[in-house]
Image (cartoon, rainbow, N blue to C red):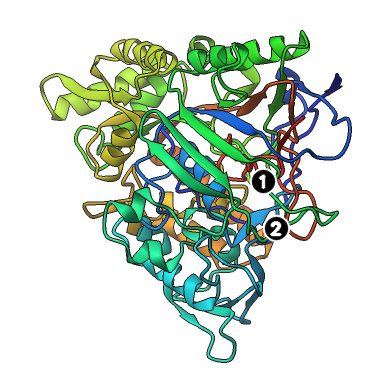
Amino acid sequence: MASQAGTRRWAKFGAAAVALSLALAACGSSSSTEANKTTTDVTIKASGEPKVGGTVKFGLEAESDGFNPTTNRWAVSGYMIGNAVFDPLSAYDSAGKWQPYLAKSFTPSADFKTWTIAMRPGVTFSDGTPVDGAAVAKSLEAARKDALVGIALRNMASATVDPANPLNAIVTTVDAWASLPALLSTQVGYIVAPAQLDAEKPASSNQPIGSGPFIQKEWIPDSYWVGTKNANYWRSDEKGNKLPYLDSVEFRPIVDPQTRTSALIGGDINMMQTTDWASIAKLQSEAEAGNLQFVADRGETEENFIMLNTSKAPLNDVRVRVGLAYCTDRDQVLVVSESPADRAADSQFAADSPYYVKTDFPNNDVAKGTELINAYKAENPGPLTFSLGTTPVPGNTAVTALIAQQWSRCGVEVQQKTTEQSKFVLDAATGQFDANYWRQFAAPDPDGDYQWWIGANAVGPLTLNFARLNDPQVDAALNKARATQDETVRKQAYADLQKRQTELVPYIWLAHTQWAIGAAKNVRNVTNVSLPDGQPSAAMLAGFDGAVRLTQTWIE
């Protein structure tokens, strides 16, 4: 058994790279060597050439509401199945820069308002229809017109077929978009076959048709999803062998991370994902004992935080939000969540990110917090009460119970609430919450999180700016960064963003997360995959921590 120490994560990159995550989490930034002392990868080297055949049974953290990327709400579990059926137009390399994937190339105009997306000749969907400019334009337009997914594409004016070349699609934008191709590594860039887009519900969501390595065979919601090899998949490995190697994949939603870990150890599944620190410790211990394999994500991390609905009283008052931040003891939260102390977060960026600035984010000063809360109460007599929600996972409810106790020190009454993940996400999008324990913001480039923060997405019945913070200074910083590839300008813009967020506190930052993959001893290429041009890919999907492609995985 070969043990490989993960001593480094991606170096931050300088030019256009962005990831829009429609991995609506619930639930930043490369970490330092110090942070990586908590995890050591353990993998087994292949004894020879890749083997064809076999099945991977993969434990997911949740079920998804469907597999149409232009309409459904994908968290990390949705991306796992999405990558089995579909291909994104772009993807990230091992250095954290976007590269063409399903697309052959991206060519911008000088003002970054027109992009030509050239597609690869001869590629087809699993139903035999071509993946050409018309199909790409139809898929992007379908996403743009969706009430929720389309919010992320508000800056896209149109997607059309190139009149000079039917293999190409032309995307025009309202304002300059220097990093558009990286957006297309995300849910909106997963290209759907016209036949699926034209199907009536529920077939449009539960019968996916893509160009990916597997074809859906059966989906029993809350039980399993099975896909079989796409014999006509367009990709081959560097030696010309057709991909994928596996005959089939099976994904099982196992919500509780401890149960998921036990299923792997017991052999019921042979791969799994987790961000739960207790599970990570157990997986690593088992790997070091020689019982399985373990790989931690060294790329961009999500953050755990409390998301506040700034549009609803009493959280629409900045004194309450800042007061709650002061009333939160981040160190205690790390202990309860079993997160290493070096994962503490005071921003969406880790301290060694080129975008990070120290803003003295409020934390653990009960006197200051109480003073602000009392100032609000003086003008608004009566109890200060609201709900704090999370998903029904024991580790999550332990954290919210602690935070509710901490806030009570400042005279706040908290009603704790748990909701199944897909409804939890929908409630956030529709503003049906007060405060939520949340996990998000893993874009390698900050512009990938633009749609979660821009004020235009903070209003209406459906939003992607879940905190519903509509602030001109935040918007100015985001728009300034989006329009350029000049890193000096971008760093200053994101510094302005962090300072303003610290003043307004739409989020109470808690911890930078860690995703990890566990695998049985006979699985090969757990995360070691390549892009179509042969260069190494990001080990896990940039912006969607915990999701991996199984295109080049095999059973030995």
Per the image, label 2 sits on a secondary structure element best described as loop
Q: Which residue is mark 2?
A: 235
Residue 442: which quarter of the image? top right
Percent of width and height locating residue 321: 33, 31
Residue found at x 43% / y 22%: 255
* Image quadrant where one finds the N terminus: top right
In this view, 80 is above or below 326: below
SS at mark 1 in the image: loop
9 or 75, which is in the foreground?
75
Q: Quadrant of residue 183?
A: bottom right
What kind of residue is marked 1? Thr
Residue most extreme to the bottom: 164
Circle 1 sits on which residue?
A: 551
Q: Residue at x 40, y 11 (%)?
A: 398
Q: Residues within 10 Å of mark 1 (few under 14, many from 20)?
A: many
- In depth, the one of 456 and 145 nearer the eye is 145
Residue shown at the point (62%, 39%) measured from the top left: 548
Q: Which residue is more in the foreground, 414 or 101?
A: 101
Q: Are marks 2 and 1 in contact (CB under 8 Å)?
A: yes
Specify the amino acid type for callout 2: Arg
Horizontal side, residue 221 vs residue 349: left or right: left
